[in-house]
Amino acid sequence: MIDSDFIKKWEPKYDEIESDEREYNVLVNLVKTETQNNHRISLATFKRIIQWKSPRVKGKIDWSNYKSYQQAVRQILNSDFSEKMNILMALSGIGAPVASTILHFVYPHIYPIYDFRTVQVLYYCSYLTSKTVNQTQYPKFQEIILKMRKDLVYYNLRQIDRALFAFHKINPKIFKNFCELKKNRYNLNQKVSRITTNAVEENESSRSIPEIYTLGAMPRKRDFFKGQINDLSLSDKDGWRRRDIWFFKHNINDGEIFDYPKGGVEIVLIDTDNERYELRFSKPDLEKKVCLGTPSKLKPWYKKKKYSDHGVDKENQHVYFQFTGHRKEFIILTEREYNSRIRDVMP
């Protein structure tokens, strides 16, 4: 859950990774003065806004026709709030993130800055159902941020934005895979989705192994692997503490290290009640361990196994995985189940 504790922790960290707050404050005052006194934003100030938000956009702006941008600013000052974003996005080079930034400097208490980092944090925390950044999705984003501001009475839109931005940038292991996997996401899903349990059983001898599984030797049936649950120091909207798992690539049986699994590969976990959970490995993907992400998918299992909702208990921070012999299916066991030798009677 993104609450006051979250903002208090992450908002100050923004200044550890960025150095643009002084310019932000200057621009807020400049835009306020220019729009109130002259009903416009000067060319110099507009350039500084673009430079502050996204320098690469400068090459897409039609600077030779800046009058059209000034006219648009005058329009937004006198239009309904529902129309302001549309007016700016009709301009050359202005997308939803930049339009939201211009509107934020004009109305700093109404329009939050739209950014892929903040969107991904909200998506990760289950506030948003899509991490797409476009004009259509902005109203929902705005609604959520404004509700946060209302609930967190001691913080303004900029402080909320700083906290979300900092959390994203300081935690690359959670979010880096979003960007790296986006380009190959379709092909990867197509490859993995074909590897169903039935298909493997029906055609095991003739099926060629897809490229994603030729990265190294596959485990053997009944091989055991150890995992370590990590507290992500962030709660979802229900107050449940989010967590991921380090999956150690050496099996417990004889210590052999496998290249499999790799970041981006899907895994199906099967618990002792034969319930199935579909997750995906992500970054970081290191030599001896890989991160098992998408923590919300395993939330029902944590609850069923009586793990604390409020954090990771050091006495129960290890889990165990038994390879079934099918390419993406593992049995998942708690430490107690493993130590009770349930593994000896599992199929």
Image: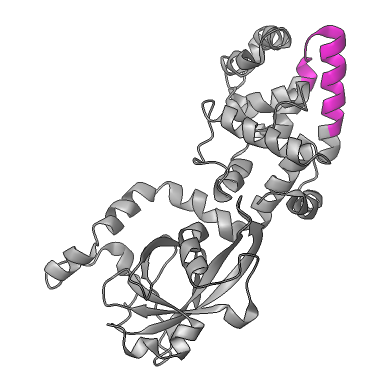
Picture quadrant where residue 191 is located: bottom left
Tell me what residue is drawn at x 61 percent, y 70 percent: 308
Q: Which residues are magenta?
A: 25-45
| Left or right: residue 246 compared with residue 42 | left
Tell me what residue is drawn at x 17 percent, y 63 percent: 199
Dominant SS type (magenta):
helix
Q: Position of residue 84 (x, y in %)?
A: 64, 15
Picture quadrant where residue 233 is located: bottom right
| Left or right: residue 88 compared with residue 295 | right
Magenta span contains residue 37: yes
| Left or right: residue 75 compared with residue 285 | right
Can residue 338 be seen?
yes
Is 14 placed above or below 295 here?
above
- 137 or 281, which lies in front? 137
Is 302 placed above or below 39 here?
below
Q: Position of residue 236 (x, y in %)?
A: 60, 53
Tell me what residue is drawn at x 35 percent, y 84 percent: 223
Magenta span contains residue 131: no
Tell me what residue is drawn at x 81 percent, y 13 percent: 35
Is 251 placed above or below 210 here?
below
Picture quadrant where residue 127 is located: top right
- 202 or 30, which lies in front? 202
| Left or right: residue 188 compared with residue 134 | left
Outermost bottom residue: 254
Q: Position of residue 125 (x, y in %)?
A: 58, 50
For the C terminus, the quadrant is: bottom left
Label count reads 0
- 266 or 324, which lies in front? 324
Can residue 282 be seen?
no
